[in-house]
Image: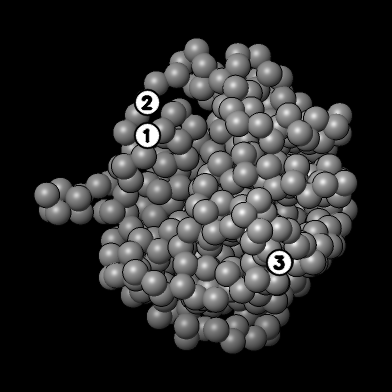
Amino acid sequence: MEQKKDKKTKGGFTGSLGFVLTAAGSAVGVGNIWRFPYLAARDGGGLFILIYLILVLTFGFTLLTTDIAIGRKTGKNAWNAFASIRPKWGFLGKLTFLVPVIIMTYYSVIGGWIVKYLAVYVTGQGAAAAEDGYFTSFISSKIAPVVFMLIFLAISAFIVFNGVEKGIEKFSAAVMPGLFIMIIGIAIYSLTLKHTDASGVTRTGLQGLSVYLMPNFEGLTFSKFLSILLDAMSQLFFSLSVSMGIMITYGSYVKKDVNLNKSVAQIEFFDTGVALLAGMMIIPAIYVFSGTEGMTSGPSLMFVSLPKVFASMGKMGPVIGLAFFVMILLAALTSNISIMETLVANCMNIFKTSRKKTAGYITLYSLVTATLICLGYSVFYFECKMPGGATGQLLDIMDYASNSFLMPLISLLTSIFIGWVVKPKWIEEEMTVGAKKFSRKRLYAFMIRYIVPAIMGVLFLQSTGVFSLFAK
Ligand code: PFF
């Protein structure tokens, strides 16, 4: 009864395809198109890819299955889901709710940067964007980043206001197939590139592809391997949108006749496929125009290195630049609406308010916090030493708190809760509703009881900096 009531106030997905496309819409975002390629480039190409693929099929599968099954079985959001299973564990729901609360503060800021770059290519200013210092001078100005963030936030809010079926599902179903086609198109174009630089060296897209795919074991030590593993693991959380309550919320909208096994496999496939294709699109292009040195630029890749690559492409540059930023804007929007929807859905339950009213308050919350984060590069600029050694601003602190600190902690607690308190059988029951086959059942039980808690425990300790104390 309770479940029915919840469904009525929240709405639900029309069917399996709508669910998969919307969940993939949340999963596929800047993480796939920007973060995955730069990590792959930095962490030994094929070696990183291989580790990542293994993690997707083990950890990714386990965490995604857990979130979606908890959501559908309880019919509730994270805030109430854990408490409804075991009242003592209600705290875990509150902790999980904290993640989108934090991510919401900065995701629209990055969304705003993407809108800005799209505007740059629409108005034909690609050459200016390729100049040194363009990006820094943009984010450190006081007004422009806030204005572009507002545009991004307004579009997201509009979609969430319209609800699950008419807003979020409709938008994701329209956008995701197009995004897939565009990324394949640009990846193919990228492989056909060829360029001779000032010193007479000619590099081709296909050579770039082999740099991307061939494992690089040069200088590989045990500690380097561990750091690649950690990079791949945190990328996995972020990329699949797991352990942050989003997939629990989306799971609660799924009808009982949908085969969750298939949906989980399709989401894994979609998310990983887009990440691999994004690497195929970006790494060869950077390699052709800037060689291997161009690939170590890290986070600045999307806003600094890529505009330079587009500028070197000649006539096709502005067109490809435009297509690229349209694509990444759509991917970022479907992810942002999933964060917003999770907040709205949880708050609707907590405060018993209507969708429109709650969405209004959440928009206001995002507006205020994202403005503060934008100003973290100008008015409130300061330098904070991050546990990894890099210096960060407000945005990096929020990112660290959610992705590096809270997510491993939540995964650790969830795996203890499901693996040892409620037992994997509880999840298995949900995965086999309607006599569906849960073929990875054994793998699931083994992972959730032993491997996930062990590795998450290590990751969590690592994020607190405890290990570096011992190293001293
Ligand atoms: N999974 C998205 C990506 O890979 O970009 C990012 C994301 C979406 C992160 C939703 C967090 C989130 F709550």
Q: Is residue 399 above or below residue 410?
A: above
State the SS at label 3: strand
Residue 133 in the figure: left or right of residue 391:
right
Residue 164 location, x and y as percent?
A: 78, 47
Which class describes the residues within 10 Å of circle 2: few (<14), some (14-19), or many (20+)? Answer: few
Quarter residue 203 falls in: bottom right
Q: Residue at x 43, y 51 (%)?
A: 407
Which numbered disc flags the more N-terminal residue, 3 or 2?
Answer: 3
Residue 75 location, x and y as percent?
A: 63, 56
Which numbered disc flags the more N-terminal residue, 1 or 3?
Answer: 3
Identify residue for label 2.
Answer: 383
Q: Residue at x 68, y 18 (%)?
A: 144
Which numbered disc flags the more N-terminal residue, 2 or 1?
Answer: 2
Q: CA distance from mark 3 to mark 2?
A: 40 Å
Residue 76 location, x and y as percent?
A: 60, 52
Which class describes the residues within 10 Å of circle 1: few (<14), some (14-19), or many (20+)? Answer: few
Identify residue for label 1.
Answer: 391
Residue 16 location, x and y as percent?
A: 78, 67
State the SS at label 1: strand
Q: Which numbered disc, 3 or 2, marks the residue closer to the eye?
A: 3
Quadrant occupied by the N terminus: bottom right
Identify residue for label 3.
Answer: 204
**Residue 18 seen by the camera:** no
Residue 451 in the figure: left or right of residue 153:
left
Q: Are marks 2 and 1 in contact (CB under 8 Å)?
A: yes
Q: Which numbered disc, 1 or 3, marks the residue closer to the eye?
A: 3
